[in-house]
Image (cartoon, rainbow, N blue to C red):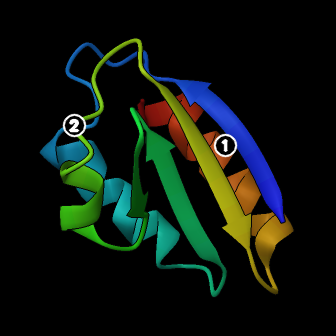
Amino acid sequence: MQTFTYVIKDELGIHARPAGLLVKEAKNFASTITLEANGKKGAAKGLMGVMSMGVKQGHEVTVTIEGDDEVAAAEAMKSFFETNL
């Protein structure tokens, strides 16, 4: 299991466009990828799950990756968050 935390820097938080890109990136991996913020959890492979979390700028998100390709998925997710959020 791989885990990392990230503080959202995007002034709009995880809104529709980056949420869609996040889901698309997560679907490239077989591992289960879960986001947790503000006491809510959501699967990174489901757009509605990500959007319903209501993550805003300054919120800390914990990303948990578990599965066969978890190391590669964790690196890709870290890179995605740093580049897009």
Q: Is 38 in front, or is 25?
A: 38
Query: Mark 1 near mark 2, Cβ–Cβ under 8 Å?
Result: no
Residue located at (27% from left, 26% from top): 13
Q: Determine which quarter of the picture holds residue 72.
A: bottom right
Q: Is 42 in front, or is 20?
A: 42
Residue located at (30% from left, 32% from top): 55
Residue located at (18% from left, 46% from top): 17
Vertical order, 18 against 68 (above or below): above
Residue located at (66% from left, 80% from top): 31
Which residue has dot 2 on it? Answer: 54
Amino acid at the residue labelled 2: Gly
Vertical order, 16 against 12 (above or below): below
Q: Determine which quarter of the picture holds residue 68.
A: bottom right
Q: Determine which quarter of the picture holds residue 62.
A: top right
Q: Secondary structure at mark 1?
A: helix
Q: Residue 58: which numbered mark, if any?
A: none
Where is residue 20 drawn, in percent x and y?
25, 58
Which residue has dot 1 on it? Answer: 78
From the viewer's perspective, is 12 left or right of 70? left
Image quarter in which the C terminus is found: top left
Where is residue 49 drawn, in percent x and y?
27, 63
Where is residue 10 drawn, in percent x and y?
33, 19
Where is residue 75 drawn, in percent x and y?
76, 53
Amino acid at the residue labelled 1: Lys
From the viewer's perspective, is 35 left or right of 45? right
Vertical order, 66 against 23 (above or below): below
- Marked residue nearer the N-terminal end (1 or 2): 2
Q: Residues within 10 Å of mark 2 (few under 14, many from 20)?
A: some
Q: Rounded to the nearest whole Å, what is the CA distance between mark 1 and mark 2? A: 20 Å
Q: Secondary structure at mark 2?
A: loop
